[in-house]
Structures are given as C-alpha cells and as structure tokens.
Image: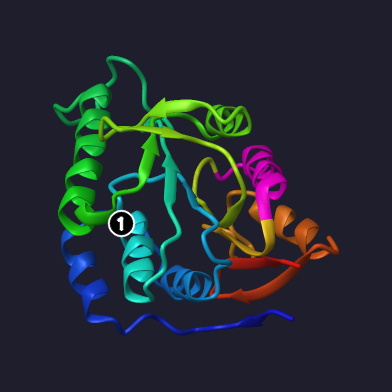
Amino acid sequence: MGEIFKKNSPDDFIRWLRFANAGMLNSGNIYCMEYAVKNIPPDSPVLEIGSFCGLSTNVILYFLYKYKKTNPVFSCDKWIFEGAGEGRRVGNGPVLHPDYRDFVKETFIRNIEFFSGDRKPYTVEAFSDEFFKKWSEKALVKDVFGRETRLGGKIGFCYIDGNHQYEFARGDFENTHRFLVPGGFILFDDSYDGNRFGLSRLMKEIKKQKPYELVMKNPNYLFKKR
C-alpha cells in the first residue's frame, strides 16, 4: 500500500525550469509525476486539469521526453481565478483581473513553446466539466495553439489541479475514473492531510474504493487504478 515519501527530483533540467517558469508546484508532486510517467500504461493519454503558467505541464512533458514515452498530453484551463472579477483590480495595484488573466494565458503559451515546443500538449480553454463533456462526445476542438484535435478515449495519468473544493474535485475524480485505464494514475494537488481545501475528505473516500491503490503521499496523494 501507499507510503509517505520525502523525495524530490534532483534533475538539473527541472531545477532550471523552475527558475524561469512561474507556478505553484509542490516539490513532492514532481517525484509523483516522474513515478507515474515511468509506469504509465503505453499510449494512453495524459490529462492535466488546470495549467496556470505551464510549470506542471512542462514537468510532465519533460519526463515523457526523458523516458521516451509517446503518450499524448491534453490539458484544460479557463484561466479564471478565484476572487477575480470583470473590471476588478488585482489587490490595490493598477492591474485589472481580465488583463492578468490574458497575461497568464499568454505566459502559459510562451512557456510551453519554449520548453516543450517539439511536443506541445493539446490545451483546451475550458472548465474541467466542459472539457470532460467534450471528451465523452469525442468532439473535434481547437486548442490554444490553434490546432484541431479529436478528444476522447482512455486516460493513463491525470493530474488534478483545478478547483480544490470538495464538490469540484470529486467531479474531476469521477470524470477521470470513467476513462482511466487499469494501471493508470491520478495525482491530486493540495490533497495533503489536513489541507484547507476539503480534499482530505475525498482522499479518505478514494482510499476505501476497491479499484484504487494508494501508491504514495509526498505529501499529496497519488493513486493507481487496479
């Protein structure tokens, strides 16, 4: 069963990436991502829910490159942040939230183009429930890089980093479960014990489900589907 790990990736590329690519990524998540990518079922897509400035996306893409995995990557984000409102300023500063949103989205695109330009993800500008609806419909969509792609099929690894409130994370888990292949992985950001978002309740529920095995806590939860 799952163990508590305190390992971080010593990889030099990751160190330099984190200097330049803005983002909020727990170092333990990097180890979990590397483990999941090394052991991902062949060919099954990787899905990331929530992308911000692309740090976690670039980390996942780098590990796929490092371990010579050919799994395609999909991600979704609407770049609408908690507390943001049309016409509202960011704190007491001169920047408006709509401009901040555009800046972050443009930063994501620029970071992906620079660090992972040879195998960019298919990133759809949508909330996760909208994305999964399109995924279940096998919809043809256009991503933020201007490319058309067909969604749908099984999933081999999902990094859930969208809305961390219980009901939203629960919905992301249930949607992922529908498509996750046996042997596939789910990593939940901010799921450490006692977190303030409400994910502790969800982690306890998933640990009781027979299809899932807790692989590790580092301190966030990585599960494997049996």
Above or below — where is 140 with respect to 199?
A: above
Quarter residue 26 falls in: bottom left
| Nearer to the camera, 41 or 217 | 41
Does residue 34 belong to the magenta stretch? no
Look at the magenta stretch and give its main secondary structure. helix
Quadrant placement of the N terminus: bottom right
Residue under the point 34% across and 64% down: 59
Residue under the point 28% across and 81% down: 11
Left or right: 31 with respect to 52?
A: right
Where is residue 213 shown, x and y percent of the image?
74, 71
Does residue 169 belong to the magenta stretch? yes
| Nearer to the camera, 140 or 80 | 140
| Nearer to the camera, 197 or 169 | 169
Quarter residue 124 falls in: top left
Left or right: 49 with respect to 215?
A: left
Q: Amino acid at mark 1?
A: Leu
Tag 1 residue: 55
Where is residue 144 shown, x and y percent of the image?
30, 32
| Nearer to the camera, 45 or 103 | 45
The magenta segment is 164-180
Residue under the point 45% across and 59% down: 71
Residue under the point 35% across and 48% down: 121
Above or below — where is 200 with respect to 98?
A: below
**Mark 1 falls on what kind of element?**
helix
